[in-house]
Amino acid sequence: MMKKYQQIYHDIKRKIENGQLKKGDRLPSIRTLSQTYRCSKDTVQHALWELTYHNLIYPVAKSGYYVFEGRVQKEKPLDFSLSGYHNIAYEDFRRCINETLIGREKDLFNTYPNQQGLTELLESLQHQLEDNAVYSKIDNIIVTSGVQQALYILTQLTFPNKKSFFLLEQPTYHRMNELVHRQNLPFLTIERDFKGINWAKLEELFKTRQIKCFYTISRYSNPLGLSYSKQEKEKLVELAAQYDVYIIEDDYLGDFAHTGDLPLHYYDTADKVIYLKSFSASLFPALRLAGLVLPQPLLQRFLDYKKLIDYDTNLIMQKALSLYLDNGMFAKNLRFLKNVFQKQMQQAEENLKAVSDYSDYRIAPQSVVLKLAADINNPQRLKESKDWHFLEEYYLENSNSNYLRLAINERLSDNLKKLFSSLQTD
């Protein structure tokens, strides 16, 4: 069944194509269209944005929307690059912010604080999460001012299992390491490398130590770009349920996972997985909003603490993100970004093959990680080499093995050639 915004889109498109609406004609106002089609203004705006995206109409500030200067408007070829995506994402989100501010003064000035999040965004997030196999009641979703705030609050809470130790995979997200170090929180670590994680050791830690929660990045881990297999995910949630350990699943690059590569949360039947959803990688870093799916026993504790440090998460940005998700812009731009990353990752693979038959590596969106061969796997030797000033920029600390991480950009090919030349020389 055709959605209402699609009906509006096709009706206006048909009128343009058959000449009922001619070049330069002004479309009816959003208010008029919403009354005509008996729908919300947001639904009309969604249709108008689709028409704008396909170069059928264009907006004029403080005036409205007009038919393009010609019935057959040739679309410009898309710039399939990261900069091209950034331009599109910025412009689309700017429109959402503008729409949030226009005619919504009463909403903004009369909305009472809701620590859980704006109702419209919670509903949008629920649908977005479902599209990514994260199924949750809306009451279990909380909006925070970025993942960092969510992680900080989680480190302050007493968990229902009454245990005290955080367990962190290593290497991992540097800010999570900083959180436990700077607060002098009790924590343990377990290595997760190209061979995976030591499951016997993990179970031993779960069984014998007071592990309150295990922080892990299930898909495209930071910084190594590792992903658990389906069997590993099932095993991890099974161990968590067996030994009463919570899992913090940071899924910051989950939007770019392969089809069938589902989040840990999907396999959790014991309500032990805390799921974190960030929009920094798929939209832009400046958008400090994140979605958090919490097990029921942690909900009120989290909200009570959030009230102490955050009067309210930015309402304007929450409403803009809700519009961005609901009007299809996020899905459209995510498809674009996936295309960009796929091409970049393919190019990185070709660059690696060109410099060496190097098998021990992982390629993730925006980065490639190399594990150094055994004969040069010596930190002291690397630091004494004549090219350490070059290697240091890419060297990853906090691991029992030696890894180099390079950004996937226009300099990747040259950096790889220089890297392998320096390693072979030394």
Image: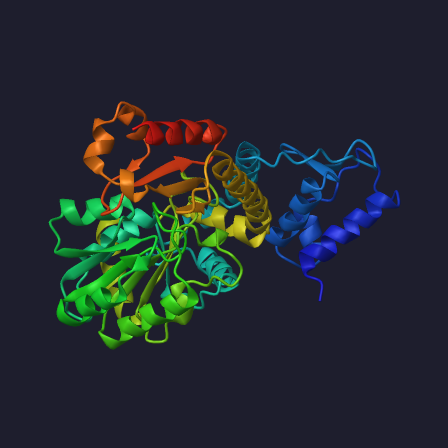
**Residue 80 showing in the rendered view:** yes
- Quarter holding the N terminus is bottom right
Q: Residue at x 38, y 65 (%)?
A: 264
92 lies above or below 416: below
Front residue of this view, candidates 168 and 69 = 168
Q: Is residue 16 left or right of residue 408?
A: right
Q: Is residue 95 left or right of residue 114?
A: right
Front residue of this view, candidates 124 and 62 = 124
Q: Residue at x 31, y 74 (%)?
A: 238
412 lies above or below 193: above
Q: Residue at x 13, y 67 (%)?
A: 209
22 lies above or below 5: above
- Tell me the quarter of the picture where residue 379 sits: top left
Q: Position of residue 23 (x, y in %)?
A: 82, 34
Q: Is residue 403 left or right of residue 283?
A: left
Q: Position of residue 363 (x, y in %)?
A: 44, 45
Front residue of this view, candidates 302 and 89 = 89
Front residue of this view, candidates 69 and 225 = 225
Q: Is residue 180 left or right of residue 217?
A: left
- Tell me the quarter of the picture where residue 317 sits: top left
Q: Position of residue 349 (x, y in %)?
A: 51, 42
- Tell me the quarter of the picture where residue 115 sits: bottom left
- Quarter holding the C terminus is top left
